[in-house]
Image (cartoon, helix red, strand yellow):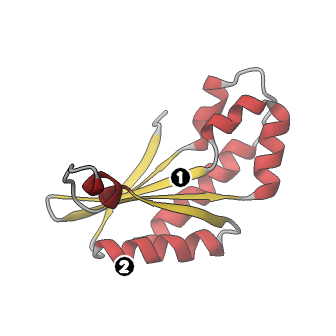
């Protein structure tokens, strides 16, 4: 089982970031924060290409998994990473279907698969 779901896109970086934000909203999630990793590292004297981490959440889903095991909060909120490398824009998301491996006692039902599918749709539709 893959930890991530990753694709490349022909879109430029900023267009891909905007597309991901739009698709997150369409999927019923809310963007909580966008980390501009490039800017943060640049302020410390480290140079990297464009990179942003979009944190997003669905309150009902978060509540459900936190009720199953509070330590799942270590994996929240969901994140999508966008970056460029060798002129190519990449969109990558962590797959919630890995949660049962880390929290085997939590009774999560089909929720990890449901959220995993939604994240894949967000990424695919952002392409």
Local secondary structure at mark 1:
strand
Classify residue 62 as left or right of residue 21.
right
Question: Is there CB contact under 8 Å for labels 2 and 1?
Answer: no
Instruction: Count how many numbered circles sit on residues in the image.
Output: 2
- Residue 67 percent location from the top left of the image: 85, 37
Give the residue at mark 1: 79
Which disc, if any, is residue 36?
A: none
Distance between mark 2 and mark 1 Cα atoms: 18 Å
Q: Residues within 10 Å of mark 2 (few under 14, many from 20)?
A: some
Q: Is residue 12 above or below residue 79?
A: below
> What residue appears at the point 21 percent right and 54 percent down from the top-left corner?
48
Q: Residue at position x 59%, y 51% from top?
A: 78
* Camera sees residue 15: yes
In the image, residue 98 above or below residue 96 = above
Q: Residue at x 27, y 49 (%)?
A: 44
> In the rendering, at what x and y percent does residue 127 appear?
39, 71
Q: Which residue is under mark 2?
A: 15
- Residue at 69%, 25% (x, y): give it: 103
**Quarter of image, res 121:** bottom right
């Amino acid at each position: 089982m893959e930890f991530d779901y990753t694709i490349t896109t022909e879109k430029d970086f900023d267009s891909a970031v905007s597309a991901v934000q739009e698709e997150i909203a369409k999927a019923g999630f809310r963007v909580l924060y966008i980390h501009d990793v490039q800017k943060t590292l640049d302020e410390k004297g480290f140079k990297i290409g464009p990179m942003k981490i979009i944190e997003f959440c669905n309150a009902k889903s978060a509540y459900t998994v936190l009720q199953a095991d509070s330590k799942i909060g270590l994996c929240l909120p969901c994140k999508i990473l966008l970056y460029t490398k060798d002129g190519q824009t990449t969109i990558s998301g962590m797959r919630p279907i890995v949660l049962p491996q880390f929290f085997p006692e939590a009774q999560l039902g089909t929720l990890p698969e449901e959220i995993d599918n939604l994240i894949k749709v967000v990424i695919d539709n952002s392409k």
